[in-house]
Image: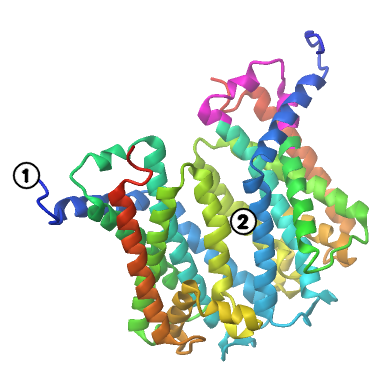
Amino acid sequence: MPHAQRLVGSSLNWYGAYTFYFKEVRRFLKVPAQTVVAPMATTLLFLAVFSLAIGGAGRTMAGVPLLNFLAPGLIVMAMMQSAFANASSSLIMAKIQGTIVDLLMTPLGPLELMIGYVFGGATRGLITGAVLLLAVQPFVSVLPVHIGYVLFHAVAASIMLALLGLLGGLWAEKFDHISAVTNFVITPLAFLSGTFYSVDRLPGIWHSISQFNPFFYAIDGFRYGFIGRADGDLTTGIIVLLAIDIALWIACHRLLASGYKLKP
Amino acid sequence: MTPFHPRIGNQVNWYGLWTLYLREVTVSVKMAGHTLLAPMIMGLLFLAVFSLALGGGSRLVSGVPFLTFLGPGLVMMGLVHAAFEGAANSILHSKLEGTIVDVLMPPLGPTEFVAGHIFGGATRGLFVATAMLLAMQPFVSLIPVHPGLVLFHAVASALVLAMLGLIAGLWAQKWDNLAMINNFTITPLAFLSGVFFSTESLPELWRAANLFNPFFYMIDGFRYGFIGHADASPSLGIAMILTLVMALWLVCHRLVATGYKLKP
């Protein structure tokens, strides 16, 4: 056992950050039925429903069979929802149960807390994504053609949503607040940003709005990695995602450092 | 104030039943953001996503435009979830918080207990269905052609799901249990029983299985009230749903009378 060390200056408490990250990961691995199997069931249901409702394998979207178009969108949607749910629920639960003091008392600074919450949430997103990718294979063969794009967008989107989850968890004072954010912000954004359809189908104004929507770039870029075709500009998407991630990271760090809604 | 007097024999304590029912409804009304607004948004999102994914409203299902077909299905899905959750959450919450004694101690027998909770849950389901129907009108005009059938299927389905919710609430010992039932039973049944597609497009075996699926009859019969076309015989559906209502009532009554997971 290493000895506990005082944090000097801004040096990172690696051991503490790692411990906290590990705690965040074990937290969701303890209830795999809810964290991994439930999104799997939902995604497969959506696949079944869309292929039945839209009838016939002959339909295409953006030049590929509908299910091949749909599957990457559903996978990244589930990843984003998982990453958000993990960070936000972990934080709000700690706040409500009072176990947040276990974090505030330890020699973990804002940076270590960020690492644990954000990478813990992102890890859940990525595990969900990997499991879903395997689960949909019997129904539709989706294989990455540009692995780099798949990985970048998976990681960037999971981190973005984990950061949003952290923000949501900090702001919320009860579970209702979190479910309000989930129901009225995250789910609509995930549904309407091109998970189920090509945004080329959107009427004028909505099409323009989607050019400013980071969820759209995350879904579009991730799907590009599988079908080799994107609705938006990939470079713009990468810049937007990186910029959002950095901006959210700074905002969360600021809030944690100032003790916003955490310390009296 | 009605003076308190003891019950004799099997007489129903109407005043107590009314009070319990009112409590259940007040809970739903107090959290309208959750109980009403969230399913409304969900219904509209599904409507938007399906009309965009399908591109153009020219597609016909069962002889009507797809959105007209989908609307009643989505309303029914919202109703089913709301009625189930209304009853299940109320009971589990009381059990976990220990406030269940407030219902067990007063002069309320199993009949009042069951009736109060299931009418409360069913009322929540009917509120949600009404709200969803109104919210959808700007996008797709849904006017009942057989109001009697619409009403019957709405009320009977709400009762069935509220009773299932009551049983689930009695059985569950933590929120995880309820989430499991929701994710792996209610949602798949609602999704796969014809909310989104006509069962005529299903493979033969699945279609035959659906003839034993009460969810299918609820959705099909409710939709028949709007579009005048059913996949299966409405009278068979009505008989099946009524049988289910009575059977579930007996089960619920028995469980509560024996104190299953309620009394030590």
Nearer the viewer's eye, disc 1 or disc 2?
1
Q: Secondary structure at mark 1?
A: loop
Q: Position of residue B38 (x, y in %)?
A: 63, 53
Figure quadrant of residue B227: bottom right
Q: Are marks 1 and 2 in contact (CB under 8 Å)?
A: no
- Label tally: 2
Determine the main secondary structure of the stretch shown in magenta. Answer: helix
Q: Position of residue A120 (x, y in %)?
A: 32, 57
Q: How is the image coloured?
A: rainbow
Range covered by the magenta-colored residues: B94-118
Checking the image for residue B187, the label placed there is 2
Q: Amino acid at mark 2?
A: Thr
The type of residue carrying mark 1 is His
**Chain at numbered mark 1:** A
Is the residue marked by circle 2 packed among few (<14), some (14-19), or many (20+) residues within 10 Å?
some
Q: Is residue B28 left or right of residue A115?
A: right
**Looking at the picture, how far across and down is residue B95, in whole percent?**
55, 29
Query: Which residue is labeled 1 in the image?
Result: A3
* Residue at x 31% of width, y 51% of height: A256
Horizontal arrangement in the rendering, residue B259 relative to residue A213 (left or right)? right
Residue at horizontal 83 percent and vertical 17 percent from the top: B11
Q: Is residue A127 magenta?
A: no
Q: Say whether residue A152 is left or right of residue B219.
A: left
Q: Say which residue appears at 35% left-offset and 74% top-offset.
A: A242
